[in-house]
Image (cartoon, coloured by chain):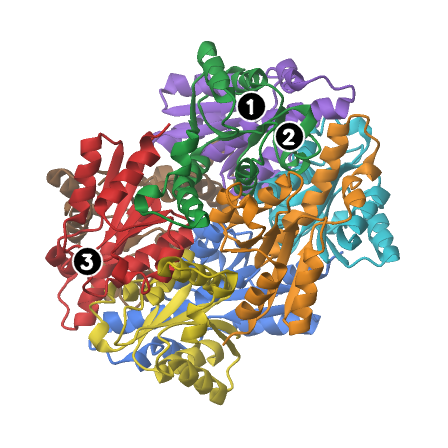
Chain colours: A green, B orange, C cyan, D purple, E blue, F yellow, G brown, H red
Amino acid sequence: MKLNVYLSGEIHSDWRAQIIEGCQKEGLDISFSSAVTNHDASDAAGDGLGDEQNSFWRDHKSAKVNAIRIKHLIENCDLAVIRFGEKYKQWNAAFDAGFCAALGKSYITLHDESLVHALKEVDGAAQAWAQTPAQVVDILKYLTTQA
Amino acid sequence: MKLNVYLSGEIHSDWRAQIIEGCQKEGLDISFSSAVTNHDASDAAGDGLGDEQNSFWRDHKSAKVNAIRIKHLIENCDLAVIRFGEKYKQWNAAFDAGFCAALGKSYITLHDESLVHALKEVDGAAQAWAQTPAQVVDILKYLTTQA
Amino acid sequence: MKLNVYLSGEIHSDWRAQIIEGCQKEGLDISFSSAVTNHDASDAAGDGLGDEQNSFWRDHKSAKVNAIRIKHLIENCDLAVIRFGEKYKQWNAAFDAGFCAALGKSYITLHDESLVHALKEVDGAAQAWAQTPAQVVDILKYLTTQA
Amino acid sequence: MKLNVYLSGEIHSDWRAQIIEGCQKEGLDISFSSAVTNHDASDAAGDGLGDEQNSFWRDHKSAKVNAIRIKHLIENCDLAVIRFGEKYKQWNAAFDAGFCAALGKSYITLHDESLVHALKEVDGAAQAWAQTPAQVVDILKYLTTQA
Amino acid sequence: MKLNVYLSGEIHSDWRAQIIEGCQKEGLDISFSSAVTNHDASDAAGDGLGDEQNSFWRDHKSAKVNAIRIKHLIENCDLAVIRFGEKYKQWNAAFDAGFCAALGKSYITLHDESLVHALKEVDGAAQAWAQTPAQVVDILKYLTTQA
Amino acid sequence: MKLNVYLSGEIHSDWRAQIIEGCQKEGLDISFSSAVTNHDASDAAGDGLGDEQNSFWRDHKSAKVNAIRIKHLIENCDLAVIRFGEKYKQWNAAFDAGFCAALGKSYITLHDESLVHALKEVDGAAQAWAQTPAQVVDILKYLTTQA
Amino acid sequence: MKLNVYLSGEIHSDWRAQIIEGCQKEGLDISFSSAVTNHDASDAAGDGLGDEQNSFWRDHKSAKVNAIRIKHLIENCDLAVIRFGEKYKQWNAAFDAGFCAALGKSYITLHDESLVHALKEVDGAAQAWAQTPAQVVDILKYLTTQA
Amino acid sequence: MKLNVYLSGEIHSDWRAQIIEGCQKEGLDISFSSAVTNHDASDAAGDGLGDEQNSFWRDHKSAKVNAIRIKHLIENCDLAVIRFGEKYKQWNAAFDAGFCAALGKSYITLHDESLVHALKEVDGAAQAWAQTPAQVVDILKYLTTQA
């Protein structure tokens, strides 16, 4: 069984690489996708369309360019993994979770126990809560290879 | 024109009351709804279904009971107003925004300028960004009464 | 807040009456609906369309007439309560649960602890599991009256 | 004509193998998929995410992990075959049937005559009722090869 | 239980009146709707938009004006009754049946036994086949009043 | 039969008033709605959310506030009438037509013969083309009152 | 541009072959599909599931087996061509047209001028009316090869 | 990341070629599609179906044939680029934009600053506004190649 998995959320740790490499080692038939994770490039996504003096509109243009990619990838994925780290607001990750929930897309959350109470609504609509990338790899292996 | 407006997000300030009272003063034909905003009641929503020793499952049960109401109200609203305050993670508010976006429901965000960069994805899919409850009342008045 | 609640499943105990009366005592604004619960009438739903010598076709005709009502009520409800008793196969109740799940309709299961393992897939897609009608009444009260 | 066929239900007899091998002998262009049919593995699907002392939550976690696979496969199949045996409650099979019905997915039921009355609602929404795997193979051959 | 019932098909006999009056006598809470059944008015529905010399375009304009009403009523009905008489092609009735089927709207066919083979695909997607208006009234009574 | 009719397009002639008054004279059960047709108010719809020095963003904010109303009204109408005048680009009217087409909403175009070639794609997806408000009134009368 | 084209309707003339061969001669990138067009095989589609003494049920079983294929092919086609001949009721062809219309699938009708009035509702929802298979080939060539 | 991009609008300048060649130079994995852009061929799309003396019907037939292709391509694209030039009404381009908006398809507008006010509703639902084909190429490169 093949799966397209969208990886959403935190860009300050290597959780994406851990999951991707973990699946490669297991030889799983999974393709991964993500939003642009280069922070500076992402913030500048709309800059080529003209300069903005107002930071709201600079952010707005970039966010809407990025949304073309994010929406396309979420709508075409079979499963999302949504990571919340300890720092930052990460509202975009929660936004992606709500987007998945409304579309009926399954998603797995990935976060530490310390965030359980703050993420209860996001976890409530998730199919699973994992605490480590290795757990995610195990689930993906189970889903795609168990007879 | 009548509107059903769902009010999502922060429960620690009186922004809901300001919007509702502002619309009442203007005599607008708008009905408002919200998730349960009593913090303790909301956290205990699932307690009647049996005690849990594990806090994850206590939260999980309550979140899923609350989701019955939230999902029903969002799916039946014409517009959502989604408030982000300065404190707390408020991932549920961003989750609601993503849910609205995927359903094609219009929403207005309500937050200070300081949160603009962190909320750029959430604002990117919004129909408007307001900074004060009075601005929201003005938009609602315009939408429902302007010829 | 008003809710339309569909009551699915077991017809051999008075759980429907307990929920309906419990909600009436609390003065909740809830309307309830059900499939035809008169067993003989339900089995004979299609008999007026012509006699059948083959019991499969007699059942088939009645099931399809009943499905007009069931499908209509589930598609128009805001929430379903799905009851499984100790006896009988009750596959229609599980069918209704799957139907709700695919439509994104919230449902609450109502069954004893002894059925937990057998119902794990049905409970897995439910918003709550209750063991008594009184618990269901409490959730409905919370959902429709808590500020 | 190619078909993706999802095989749902009973895991205690070799009906899946009979259908798959029957189609292979006929050289049909059909790909089959199933939920995890290894009973122990399926029950333990969520164990890697942390131990649970409460059996409800152990089942719940596993059921939701399994649902990622089941939902994905049903949503992507062209046809489901849903098998009910003599033993066990098999509510998950009826749940899958309801899920298919709500999505407008065609399904064929496979069960003995003794279950006709108990399965009348499930059969009522089915496209066909077969009593043997060989009959299913014949239908699949007809659907994919008859000019 | 209230139902909106759309009556489609034959306009040369009084089957609509028989069903409506039968339901009124029973005091059922059912509202009925139909396409324009005045044959001349229906054929002339588009004439006010300008004369046509080509009969195809005259028919086309009228058919599309009538389709505004038919589509609106079918999309908003809870159940359709689709009548086929002995004479004429009545392709519009079969078209309405296909439209209902694709929308997942329940429909009942009403026709004599002589048409069974010709209508097998239309009956195959129906919830019931009735041979007389009185049978339809009985089903509607059962659906809306049986406890 | 009752209809909710959305009136889209040109704001520089009195075609809306002609249709509304024509229907009132006929006593038709039709409710009409429109975008804000006060040109200055519409252009200023977003001004209360903060000044913009860049005219693109001023227009953008107002357009998105107006879209809350337009989208809501189109999604809830039963039929749209879309008017194109001789002057101006009126791309918003064509946009509304495309929006209706994708939603499967019936619409009638209202324009002079001189615009036929330029509007062929918009007319191609319409249910009718009218040249005068009186013709629209006639169609609405026919649709809602003809037996 | 590649197209999947579903060919519905009359099975007593060689119109399918004319279209398929015409497209092959032009080298068009089109794949065609159809219901089972072998009349006897189609009528017997359900016979393997058990004998029926009642001809209604024999037809019913076969129609529902055939519907698995037809529904699958229509839902996955890009365009349908629906042929009406001079003889027979051909209600299944009109049913397919209504099914396409409700799904928003484009279809082309293929019939003689003599049937124009009887088919006005079916033609009213079509994208084109052709009178000969050669005209259909020309349209398919235009759609898939014109720059 | 691969994208299917639909290019809608103006056919009197070489903006399509600029975008396609720009992407080819960058080696992007993008497939492009368009309506028929040969003006004479497009206007004559329906001529093979029979002569029309009335220019409305000639346009109507051609527009509906062309709509088969346009609707198919828009429904299957991942992103649309919609170009408005200085001349002509270009209502079909705005119609396509509205169609995309209702389907939730992302689109980018491409037009000069002089058209900003007239296109505010169309730009309001767009994900980006570009002024040159080179800017579109840059966005497509960013979307498909940025890590």
Q: Residue at x 46, y 80 (%)?
A: F146
Q: Position of residue G5 (x, y in %)?
A: 28, 43
Q: Give, as a three-letter code, the residue at label 3.
A: Gln
Within 10 Å of disc 1 (Cα), the crowding (few <14, some 14-19, many 20+) is: many
Circles 2, 1 touching at the beta carbon (< 8 Å): yes
- In the rendered structure, the residue with mark 1 lies on which chain? D
* Residue F95 higher or lower than A54, as above or below: below
Q: Position of residue C84 (x, y in %)?
A: 76, 36
Q: Residue at x 19, y 40 (%)?
A: H20
For residue D94, which quarter of the picture? Answer: top right
- The quarter in which the N terminus of chain E is drawn is bottom right
* Residue B21 higher or lower than B102, as above or below: below
> Mark 2 and mark 3: span between their CA atoms?
51 Å
Q: Residue at x 38, y 61 (%)?
A: H121
The kind of secondary structure element at disc 1 is loop
- In the rendered structure, the residue with mark 3 lies on which chain? G
Residue D92's label in the rendered image is 2
Residue D35's label in the rendered image is 1
Residue G131's label in the rendered image is 3
Task: Find the residue positioned furthest to the bottom.
Answer: F25
The kind of secondary structure element at disc 2 is helix
Kindly tell me whether residue A119 is visible in this rendering.
yes
